Image: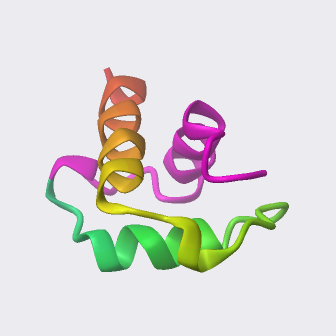
Amino acid sequence: MKWTDVREIAIELDEAHPDVDPQFIRFTDLHAWILAIEGFDDDPEKSSEGILEAIQMTWIDEKD
């Protein structure tokens, strides 16, 4: 899984953290949780605020 797999990452985060409201998560926590996803194997330095925001927005959509 790579940073570009936004929807897949959002689904994994929702399954791993079902009680979290992604609207209020800090990007530092989001980054750490993504790196902890089993099967995530991209370079941690390749993330950006834009990528993290896209993942966060997709996770919010997954909650609905």
Residue at 69 percent of width and 73 percent of height = 43
Residue at 30 percent of width and 60 percent of height = 49
Residue at 42 percent of width and 44 percent of height = 55
**Location of residue 24 in the rendering, given as x and y in whole percent from the top left corner:** 15, 58
Is 51 in the magenta? no
Query: Which segment did they paint magenta?
Result: 1-23
Q: Which is more toward the observer, 18 or 49?
A: 49
**Location of residue 16 in the rendering, given as x and y in whole percent from the top left corner:** 58, 58
**Location of residue 10 in the rendering, given as x and y in whole percent from the top left corner:** 52, 41
Specify the quadrant of the image occupied by residue 39. bottom right
**Looking at the image, is 10 positioned above or below residue 43?**
above
Residue farthest along the left direction in this orientation: 24
Q: Is residue 54 left or right of residue 34?
A: left
Is 22 in the magenta? yes
Residue at 34 percent of width and 24 percent of height = 61
Q: Is residue 42 left or right of residue 7?
A: right
The C terminus - image quarter: top left
**Looking at the image, is 27 positioned above or below residue 17?**
below
Specify the quadrant of the image occupied by residue 42. bottom right
Give the color scheme: rainbow, by chain, secondary structure or one colour. rainbow
Tell me how many marks there are: 0
